[in-house]
Amino acid sequence: MAHKYQYEMPAVAVDCVIFGLDLETKDLKVMLIERDLEPFAGMWAIPGGFVRRGESLEQAAARELEEETGINDVFLEQLYTFGDPGRDPRGWVISVAYYALVSPEGHRVVARTDARQAAWFTVKRLPHLAFDHARIVQVALERLRGKLSYAPIGFELLPRKFTVRQLQNLYEIVVGRKLDNRNFRKKIFGMDLLRELDEMQHGVPHRAARLYTFDERKYKQLVKQGLAFEI
Amino acid sequence: MAHKYQYEMPAVAVDCVIFGLDLETKDLKVMLIERDLEPFAGMWAIPGGFVRRGESLEQAAARELEEETGINDVFLEQLYTFGDPGRDPRGWVISVAYYALVSPEGHRVVARTDARQAAWFTVKRLPHLAFDHARIVQVALERLRGKLSYAPIGFELLPRKFTVRQLQNLYEIVVGRKLDNRNFRKKIFGMDLLRELDEMQHGVPHRAARLYTFDERKYKQLVKQGLAFEI
DNA sequence: CCAAAAGTGTTCTCCATACACCCATGC
DNA sequence: GCATGGGTGTATGGAGAACACTTTTGG
């Protein structure tokens, strides 16, 4: 039982930075919710809440994600734990932050039934955030940028079937710099991680691009051989 | 006040994986303490304890480190937060894990005054550990190995004045594979991060090697220029 | 003078980069 | 037929990897 310890105890929350991609505007987005309770009522924040007895931290993060935004079954990874005294005006609250990567499919617009609204914001122009959430988003962005170059997590931000150009756009958006398309293709195809589909892109006013999927089996084989993903 | 929340609350601990280097035997070591309290009394564990009101998580980790091993003023970085239900037989305890890197100077042998003993163990042959500490050490090892190749944290494990060979040994020990000394020197010197001292190694039964120190100012300049450390 | 580790250059291969044009499709 | 993005090859330079001998010192 927790209360047998001699010291005062903190509350433990999980908060989740949700990243999404707007393939049209080529923007990296973060999903925020509008707080309906004090403190910071009416202000934007990343979704989160208190951990419950009997659940793991990751389960708690997934539950809060689902409850507050309707998003489920996405890439979710622990980011960092924030525990500075004074970070929450209610008292002593330690927050275990996670970040999620969601594909554009099915999560384009999130409509929640409860009063609280959720909406996507471009990372370049975020509103003022509640608590220390600006800091948390900052850390999440650094992690995403860093990890993208050595782990195949970018695919989580794309639809299941995507074009090579979309993949390149993703990297350009997150890294923040243009890449040479010939060199990019060489590298991607050289890793042999994409499965070419018979299907083509459609509904575009120009030549249709071929669609690919990320081949997780090939990736796992590659890892076993000691070869790493790198862009 | 924490107790106004409706849910039961966990206790929050910090635990710390302490890495050290044995330059003689070329072993990577972890410092463990023998528990004197239940649960797991008499078993080896990584040092840790509960966070107190008013201190940050990092302060708590540093305090526990000092209290239980006498080590202070060392590299300390947050690792991961472990919160699976059932990880602590006393009840619901979430642990924020840190890892520390200590240099051989002054911390070769730790003699604590209280009953609990602390000792260095080779990572290759650790005893059975209390709680989920084996898992925590495992995660810390992976982080150390990974981070060593893109951040200049290895110097934290060496004495302030070291030879190039000692630096190479460090990398060979942690990465677990022999490196070509000519290529290693080329790379290290090419980054221009070491300050050459007028001093030489002494007390060795063969040609004495030159001593160097890590030049943090040069490193910070390098980072500003967008150039990254890499081995 | 012998043992042991320090210190030093060159060659080759491969990968990253730079760079420009034709192709397919929708309108 | 034209506008728009899709898709393709080559040449060059730089970095990493492979590789062996001389130098210095203590004993």
Image: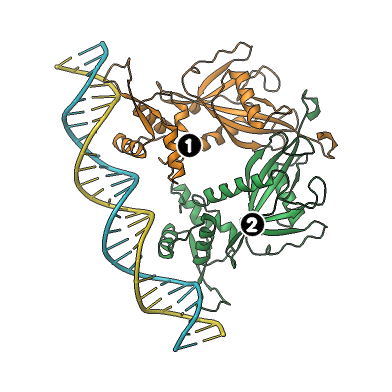
Chain colours: A green, B orange, C yellow, D cyan
Q: Position of residue B158 (x, y in %)?
A: 44, 26
Q: Please say if B42 is above or below B144.
A: above
Q: Which amino acid type is marked by label 2?
A: Arg
Is A97 on the left or on the right of A201, as rendered?
Answer: right
Q: Tag on residue B18? A: none
Check the residue under mark 2 and report the chain it is in.
A
Q: Are marks 2 and 1 in contact (CB under 8 Å)?
A: no
Number of numbered discs overlaid on the protein picture: 2
Categorize mark 2 by other alpha carbons within 10 Å: few (<14), some (14-19), many (20+).
Answer: few
Question: A29 and A227: which one is in front?
Answer: A29
Categorize mark 1 by other alpha carbons within 10 Å: few (<14), some (14-19), many (20+).
Answer: some
Question: A17 and B84: which one is in front?
Answer: A17
Check the residue under mark 1 and report the chain it is in.
B
| Disc 2 from disc 1: Cα separation | 36 Å
Is B211 on the left or on the right of A202, as rendered?
Answer: left
Question: B181 and A194: which one is in front?
Answer: B181
Marks 2 and 1 belong to one chain: no
Residue corresponding to mark 2 = A125
One can see residue A1 in this view: no
Q: Tag on residue B145? A: 1
Q: Position of residue B123 (x, y in %)?
A: 50, 28
The N terminus of chain A lies in quadrant = top right
One can see residue A10 in this view: yes
Q: Position of residue A179 (x, y in %)?
A: 45, 61
Is B80 on the left or on the right of A198, as rendered?
Answer: right
Q: Secondary structure at mark 1?
A: helix
